Structure formats: structure tokens, C-alpha cells
Image (cartoon, rainbow, N blue to C red):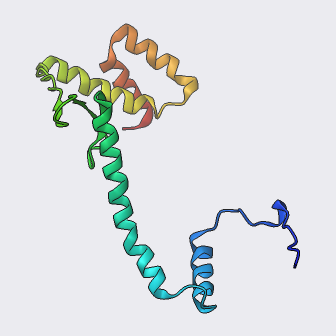
């Protein structure tokens, strides 16, 4: 009976591979005839069915939860909250509140604030206090004129 020598944990290579290293190792495994190109193709084709199985399992868990579930909409970059009922499994979406239109005065104030912020960022931090004082005492318009003249704009 042959006795196998036990490998120590330190001799094992558990380090993560880069994509280039993984490609090299795969090519060597194929070259050494440990695995065929057909095996690699089969694994790649099975990937989609495994993803489908995972998605079905996840849907089953969501349905079983019967409570609020965050659903990430692709392309929007935000999560929309969908409330799932205990029966049926169809999400009932919360309605969005309509934004009231802003007045011309509000729009002008926001434009002015945007110009102020765009210019104040270009002023050195040591000189911003003086600009802020002008904005507080004389208004943002005066502060914008002062910053524009200092910056030569």
C-alpha cells in the first residue's frame, strides 16, 4: 500500500488569477489533453442555463417573501420599489408624485446660484470669505460681478 504524502496548505496556490493567466492555464490544460475544446464549449453553453436556474430560484424567493422587494431597473441607475402581494406575484408599483412646476422667479434664482457656485469654486479658498461676505451684504449678483472681474471673465 502506497502512502501519499500530504500537501501542506502553504504549497497550494489559492491566489486569484488574472484573465491572462486564466487563458494561459486553459490553453495548457487543453494542450496537455486534460480537457478538450468541446468540454470548454459545453461549460460555456451551460452557463446560460445556470443563470436561468439562479434567476428562477431568486424569483421563487421573492414570491415567498411577500414583502417589499427592491427591483433594479436596467438603464435607469436607480432602484424602484415594488410591493409584491401574497397572492399572484405581480408587483404593484407605487405611484410617483408629480413635481409642481417652478416659477420664473425660482428658475432665475437657481440659474444665479449655479453661476455663483461655478465661479466660487475657481476662487482660492483663502479669498472665498471676502466673496461670501459680498454675497451676504450686497447679493449674489454683486458677488458674481466681483468674481468675474477677479477671474477676468
Q: Nearer the viewer, residue 68 or 62?
A: 62
Q: Residue at x 46, y 35 (%)?
A: 122
The quadrant holding residue 152 is top left
In the rendered image, the residue lying farthest to the front is 1
Q: Nearer the viewer, residue 1 or 107?
A: 1
Residue 48 is left or right of residue 73, and the answer is: right
Residue 90 to residue 147: above or below: below
Residue 57 is left or right of residue 105, and the answer is: right
The quadrant holding residue 46 is bottom left
Q: Residue at x 88, y 71 (%)?
A: 5
In the rendered image, the residue lying farthest to the top is 137
Give x and y (percent) for residue 10.
Answer: 83, 61
Q: Nearer the viewer, residue 105 or 54?
A: 54
Residue 31 is left or right of residue 110, and the answer is: right
Q: Nearer the viewer, residue 136 or 48?
A: 48
Give x and y (percent) for residue 89.
Answer: 20, 37
**Quadrant that contains the C terminus:** top left
Residue 17 to residue 92: above or below: below
Give x and y (percent) for residue 1.
Answer: 87, 79
Residue 31 is left or right of residue 72, and the answer is: right
Residue 5 to residue 30: above or below: above
Amino acid at each position: 500500500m502506497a502512502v501519499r504524502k500530504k500537501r501542506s496548505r502553504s504549497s497550494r496556490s489559492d491566489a486569484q488569477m488574472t484573465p491572462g493567466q486564466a487563458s494561459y492555464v486553459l490553453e495548457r490544460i487543453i494542450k496537455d489533453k486534460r480537457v478538450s475544446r468541446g468540454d470548454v464549449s459545453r461549460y460555456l453553453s451551460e452557463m446560460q442555463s445556470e443563470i436561468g436556474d439562479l434567476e428562477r430560484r431568486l424569483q421563487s424567493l421573492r414570491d415567498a417573501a411577500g414583502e417589499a422587494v427592491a427591483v433594479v431597473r436596467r438603464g435607469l441607475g436607480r432602484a424602484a420599489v415594488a410591493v409584491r402581494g401574497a397572492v399572484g406575484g405581480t408587483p404593484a408599483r407605487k405611484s410617483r408624485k408629480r413635481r409642481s412646476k417652478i416659477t420664473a422667479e425660482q428658475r432665475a434664482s437657481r440659474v444665479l446660484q449655479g453661476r455663483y457656485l461655478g465661479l466660487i469654486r475657481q476662487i482660492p479658498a483663502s479669498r472665498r470669505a471676502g466673496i461670501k461676505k459680498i454675497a451676504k451684504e450686497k447679493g449674489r449678483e454683486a458677488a458674481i460681478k466681483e468674481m468675474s472681474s477677479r477671474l477676468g471673465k
